[in-house]
Amino acid sequence: MDCLFCKIIAGEIPSTKVYENEYVYAFRDINPQAPVHVLVIPKTHIASADEVTPENSAAVTHVFEAIPAVAKACGLTNGYRVITNVGEDGCQSVKHIHFHLLGGKQLPETMA
Ligand code: 5GP
Ligand code: ZN
């Protein structure tokens, strides 16, 4: 499958890892929008939040179970934001579900 994030997980494309376990990989976004901007992804391919089903939702659970450890690894002691973009209107550019972890400053209240 020609998927950028599957290639990052496989180590075929380099990335700056901040956390990894059996199910989850977290790495620095190449174009950070905040002092801390990390992408947290499941190691299994799901295209987007719109493709989550009872059969594959454990991958998303694993991501959320890892998020506190990712935040800790990034020194986010005062909160952060988790965002997943979906499809065209959501401006999703990479079709492997990913959760943006943003923080390291007071984030703006508005998101849309
Ligand atoms: P989306 O727009 O799909 O929600 O987010 C995709 C994110 O992936 C963007 O924030 C973009 O900067 C990041 N990104 C795209 N290509 C690469 C890459 O090759 N390496 C890393 N580390 N991040 C990438
Ligand atoms: Zn993928």
Image (spheres, rainbow, N blue to C red):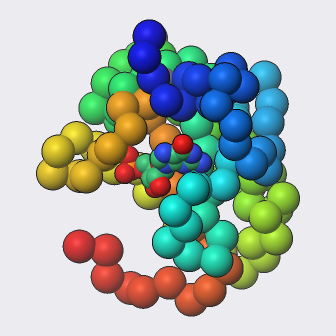
Q: Position of residue 66 (x, y in %)?
A: 72, 43
Residue pictured at 77% horizontal, 45% vertical: 17
Q: Is residue 24 above or below residue 64?
A: above
Q: Is residue 82 above or below residue 85?
A: below
Q: Where is residue 82 in the image (x, y as percent from the top left)?
A: 51, 59
Residue pictured at 50% horizontal, 72% vertical: 33
Question: How many numbered discs?
Answer: 0
Q: Where is residue 16 in the image (x, y as percent from the top left)?
A: 74, 48
Q: Residue furthest front?
A: 13
Residue pictured at 78% horizontal, 64% vertical: 74
Question: Is residue 20 found left or right of 92 in the rendered image?
Answer: right
Question: Is residue 70 found left or right of 80 in the rendered image?
Answer: right
Question: Is residue 90 found left or right of 69 in the rendered image?
Answer: left
Q: In which quarter of the image is residue 76?
A: bottom right
Residue pictured at 32% horizontal, 24% vertical: 51
Q: Quadrant of residue 58?
A: top right
Q: In which quarter of the image is residue 9?
A: top right
Q: Which residue lies furthest to the left in this view?
A: 89
Q: Which of 53 and 101 is in front in this view?
A: 101
Question: Is residue 2 found left or right of 39 in the rendered image?
Answer: left
Q: In this view, does 61 lie above or below 37?
A: above
Residue 20 visible within the image:
yes
